[in-house]
Amino acid sequence: MKRQREVENIVLKKLDLPTLVLKFNAIAGASSKLIRTDIPAGSVPGLMDLALKAKSHGLHSVALTNADDYRINSANPDYNYIRAKIAHNLKKYQ
């Protein structure tokens, strides 16, 4: 999860609309060899918009691993605790 957050931050720092628009097909083609997803192609424009918003507002994350919080256990998740933790963190940025 930590590595994923690092990759997301790097991508957001380098993301700019002109490059994305002009080189979208090349980026999509190259990444298809590295990344596999079940995201429908029709969702991509909305996700690009979301990525640009994330870049302008900054990316914040909540670690949901037992390495960061002993109360989070993937074998027996406490969903109420997880929801409360996420809601608490969202309030900081509203």
Image: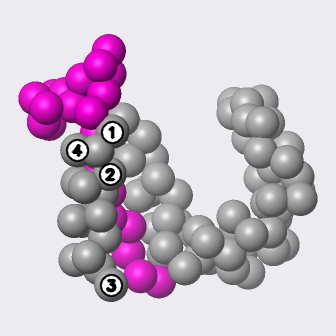
SS at circle 2: helix
Q: Amino acid at mark 4?
A: Tyr
- Label number found at residue 33: none
Where is residue 67 shown, x and y percent of the image?
Answer: 15, 28
The residue labelled by disc 4 is 81
How far apart are the alpha carbons under marks 2 and 4? 6 Å
Q: Main secondary structure of the magenta part?
A: loop
The residue labelled by disc 3 is 94
Q: Which quarter of the figure has residue 79?
A: top left
How far apart are the alpha carbons under marks 3 and 4? 20 Å
The residue labelled by disc 1 is 79
Horizontally, is 56 left or right of 64 in the view?
Answer: right
Residue at position x 30%, y 57% in the image: 86
Q: Which quarter of the figure has residue 37?
A: top right
SS at circle 1: helix
Q: Tell whether label 3 touches label 2 (CB within 8 Å).
A: no
Q: Amino acid at mark 2?
A: Arg
Foreground: 7 or 42? 42
Where is residue 7 shown, x and y percent of the image?
Answer: 45, 47
Where 89 falls versus 17 (above or below)?
above
Q: Amino acid at mark 3?
A: Gln
Magenta stretch?
Answer: 56-78
